[in-house]
Image (spheres, rainbow, N blue to C red):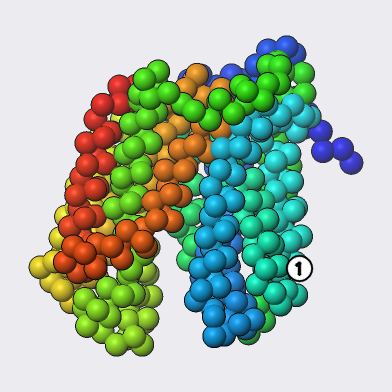
C-alpha cells in the first residue's frame, strides 16, 4: 500500500485563521502544509515524549551502566569522553537537517522523510548498542544515534510554524513542552526496569521510536512538496544560510541571546543538584540521592500545569513577552529560597516554584521563537535548529561554569546568585523584540 498522502479536500478540515493556507499546494509555488487536524497536537506530544524519554533513559541509566560494565575503573572519564564527543557532533545536527528538510521535495512532504529516516536509523542502531563491549564502538554508535534522533527532533519542531498560525502556536508549543517534561520522567522510570539487562532496554526504546514516529507521519499526513518550487542548489548559499545577521534580523538575535542566558542560569543550578544537597545542604550521598528524586517529582507537577496553562493563555490574549517576564520573576524568586533557607525545605520550595516558572517559560518561549524567524519562517527547519543551539550550548557548558563559580566565586551559594542574575538579564533581552507582543 502506498504511503502517498492524498491531497486533502480543504472543506473536510476547519482551517485556522492566520497565515496557514487551507488549500492544497500549487505546483511551482512555495511548499505548503495542511492546517492542523485533531491528530496534530496529540502527535506532536507523543513524538516529543518518545524522543525525550529515549534521551533521558539512555543518558541517565542505560549508557552509564554499560560504560561501567565495560571499564569500571575508568567509567567517569569514559562517560565524559562519550558525552563530549557526541555533543560536538550533534551540536549542529538540527540546523543542518532542518536546512535540508526545508529544501526537501517528496510525496511525503518536507519533514516526514527525515523524521522516518532518523527514527529508522536510530532505532536500528539502538538494537545493536547492547552488544558492544568497546568504548570506541560505543562512542561511534552513540554519536550516530544522537544525530539520528536529532534528525527527528529538528523537523518535528518545524511542524509548529509549518501548520499553525501565529495565534495558535502557544498550544502547539505547550504540547512539545509537555512531551519533553513527561518523557524525561517516564524515560528514566522505563530505563530503570532494564538496569540489569540494558541490551533489552535499548531495543525497547528503539522499537518505540520507530513505531511512534512512523505512525505519526502516516496518520497525520503532510501535503506533498514534490512539485513545489525550490531554489537552485548552491553550497555557498547553503552554508551562508547558517549565519543570521543580527543587524538584518535583530529580533532573531535577541531571542537567541535571551534563551541562551536563561538556559545558562537554569542549568548551572540543575547541573550540580546532587552536590548542592551534599556540600551545601549537608546531606549524606545516600540521602541526597533520594532527596534528588523527591525534588524532581515535586517540580514536575507544577511544570506540567504551567506549560498547559501558559500556552493556551498566551494564545488567548495574543501576547508572549509578558509570560517571559512573569516566568523570569518566578524563577528569580524561587532561586532566593536556598540562600535564606539552606536546608531541604528551602530546596523543596525552590523546586516547586521554579517548576511553575520553567513551565511558563518553556511553552511560550518556543512559540515566541517561531514568530521571529527570518523570512516569515520559509526556512523554519534551519532557523529553529539554530535557535536550539541556544539551549544545547548552555546545557553542555553548565557543569564547567558551575565548577568555576563554586571554586572561584565563593561556593555553592553563588550558583543561585549567578542564576538569578542571568535569568533577570535574559528577561531584559526579550524587551527589544519588536515583532512579538
Looking at the image, residue 183 lies above or below residue 94: below
Q: Is residue 415 left or right of residue 36?
A: left
Looking at the image, residue 199 lies above or below residue 1: below
Q: Residues within 10 Å of mark 1 (few under 14, many from 20)?
A: some
Q: Is residue 32 left or right of residue 383?
A: right
Q: Residue at x 24, y 47 (%)?
A: 423
Residue 43 seen in the figure: no
Residue 263 seen in the figure: yes
- Nearer the observer, 246 or 300: 246
| The C terminus, quarter of image | top left
Q: To which residue does mark 1 refer?
A: 128
> In the rendering, at what x and y percent does residue 85 appear?
57, 59
> In the rendering, at what x and y percent does residue 139 appear?
64, 65
- Give the tally of numbered discs: 1
Looking at the image, residue 433 lies above or below residue 1: above
Q: Residue at x 68, y 56 (%)?
A: 144
> In the rendering, at what x and y percent does residue 17 appear?
48, 21
Amino acid at each position: 500500500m502506498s504511503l502517498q498522502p492524498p491531497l486533502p479536500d480543504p472543506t473536510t478540515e476547519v482551517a485556522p485563521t492566520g497565515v496557514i493556507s487551507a488549500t492544497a499546494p500549487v505546483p511551482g509555488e512555495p511548499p505548503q502544509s495542511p492546517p492542523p487536524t485533531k491528530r496534530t497536537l496529540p502527535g506532536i506530544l507523543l513524538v516529543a515524549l518518545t524522543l525525550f524519554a529515549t534521551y533521558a533513559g539512555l543518558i541517565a541509566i542505560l549508557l552509564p551502566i554499560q560504560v561501567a560494565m565495560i571499564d569500571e575503573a575508568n567509567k567517569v572519564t569514559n562517560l565524559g569522553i562519550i558525552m563530549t564527543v557526541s555533543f560536538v557532533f550533534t551540536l549542529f545536527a538540527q540546523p543542518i537537517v532542518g536546512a535540508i528538510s526545508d529544501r526537501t521535495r517528496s510525496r511525503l512532504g518536507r519533514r516526514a522523510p527525515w523524521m522516518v529516516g532518523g527514527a529508522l536509523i536510530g532505532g536500528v542502531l539502538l538494537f545493536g548498542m547492547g552488544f558492544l563491549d568497546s568504548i570506541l564502538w560505543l562512542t561511534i554508535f552513540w554519536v550516530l544515534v544522537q544525530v539520528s534522533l536529532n534528525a527527528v527532533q529538528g523537523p518535528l519542531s518545524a511542524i509548529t510554524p509549518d501548520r499553525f498560525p501565529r495565534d495558535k502556536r502557544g498550544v502547539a508549543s505547550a504540547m512539545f513542552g509537555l512531551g519533553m517534561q513527561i518523557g524525561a520522567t517516564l524515560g528514566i522510570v522505563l530505563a530503570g526496569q532494564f538496569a540489569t539487562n540494558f541490551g533489552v532496554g535499548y531495543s525497547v526504546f528503539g522499537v518505540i521510536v520507530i513505531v511512534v514516529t512512523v505512525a505519526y507521519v502516516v496518520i497525520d499526513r503532510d501535503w506533498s512538496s514534490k512539485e513545489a518550487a525550490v531554489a537552485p542548489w548552491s553550497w555557498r548559499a547553503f552554508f551562508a544560510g547558517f549565519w543570521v545577521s543580527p543587524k538584518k534580523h535583530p529580533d532573531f538575535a535577541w531571542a537567541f541571546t535571551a534563551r541562551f542566558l536563561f538556559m545558562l542560569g537554569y542549568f548551572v543550578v540543575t547541573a550540580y543538584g546532587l552536590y548542592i544537597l551534599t556540600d551545601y545542604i549537608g546531606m549524606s550521598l545516600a540521602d541526597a540521592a533520594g532527596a534528588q528524586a523527591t525534588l524532581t517529582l515535586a517540580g514536575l507537577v507544577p511544570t506540567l500545569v504551567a506549560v498547559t496553562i501558559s500556552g493556551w493563555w498566551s494564545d488567548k490574549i495574543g501576547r508572549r513577552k509578558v509570560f517571559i517576564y512573569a516566568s523570569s520573576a518566578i524563577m528569580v524568586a524561587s532561586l532566593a529560597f536556598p540562600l535564606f533557607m539552606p536546608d531541604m525545605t528551602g530546596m523543596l520550595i525552590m523546586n516547586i516554584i521554579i517548576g511553575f516558572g520553567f513551565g511558563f517559560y518553556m511553552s511560550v518561549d518556543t512559540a515566541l521563537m517561531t514568530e521571529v524567524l527570518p523570512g516569515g519562517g520559509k526556512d523554519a527547519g534551519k532557523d529553529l535548529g539554530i535557535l536550539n543551539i541556544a539551549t544545547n550550548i548552555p546545557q553542555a557548558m553548565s557543569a564547567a561554569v558551575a565548577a568555576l563559580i563554586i571554586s572561584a566565586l565563593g561556593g555553592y551559594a553563588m550558583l543561585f546568585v549567578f542564576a538569578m542574575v542571568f535569568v533577570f538579564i535574559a528577561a531584559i533581552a526579550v524587551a527589544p523584540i519588536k515583532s512579538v507582543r
